[in-house]
Image (cartoon, rainbow, N blue to C red):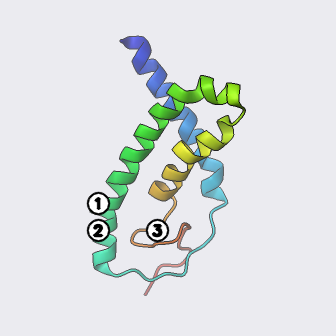
Amino acid sequence: MAKMKLNLVATLVLSVALVLPCIAAAKSVEEKPSGFAMAGDLLIARPLGLAFLAIGTVVYVASLPIALLGGNAKEVGRTLVIEPALETFVRCLGCTRLGRKEKIAK
């Protein structure tokens, strides 16, 4: 049981380490979302994104031996881990496009 927890922690740390370079390279977004869009994003979309990230990470780790044999481990990792992480953490609150807001909206 302790080994499984250690594996999960190692996987999550690796996932975050893979996402950090993508966060630094994120483009700026010029959207002005409404309050309802922000609330919906905060209460619905972000928790779902986090759940998809966790499930995708588990599936990626489980499928890693097969993906390595097939030669598409990068694509599988991008689809199952990186893309959900970007949608969850690198999109401004309420925005529909991926990226960061550089200026605070007035």
Marks 1 and 3: which is nearer the front?
1
Q: Which SS class for mark 3?
A: loop
User: Which quadrant: the N terminus?
Assistant: top left
Residue on which disc 2 sits: 40
- The type of residue carrying mark 3 is Cys
Q: Is residue 75 above or below residue 8?
A: below
| Residue 77, x across and y down, in percent | 60, 40
Q: Is residue 41 above or below residue 32?
A: above
| Residue 95, x across and y down, in percent | 45, 73
User: Which quadrant: the C terminus?
Assistant: bottom left
Mark earlier in primary sequence (1, 3): 1
Badge 2 density bin: few <14, some 14–19, many ≥20, Cα 10 Å: some
Judged from this view, the residue extending furthest toward the front is 70
Q: Alpha-carbon distance for marks 1 and 3?
A: 14 Å
- Residue located at (40% from left, 20% from top): 5
- Residue located at (66% from left, 35% from top): 73
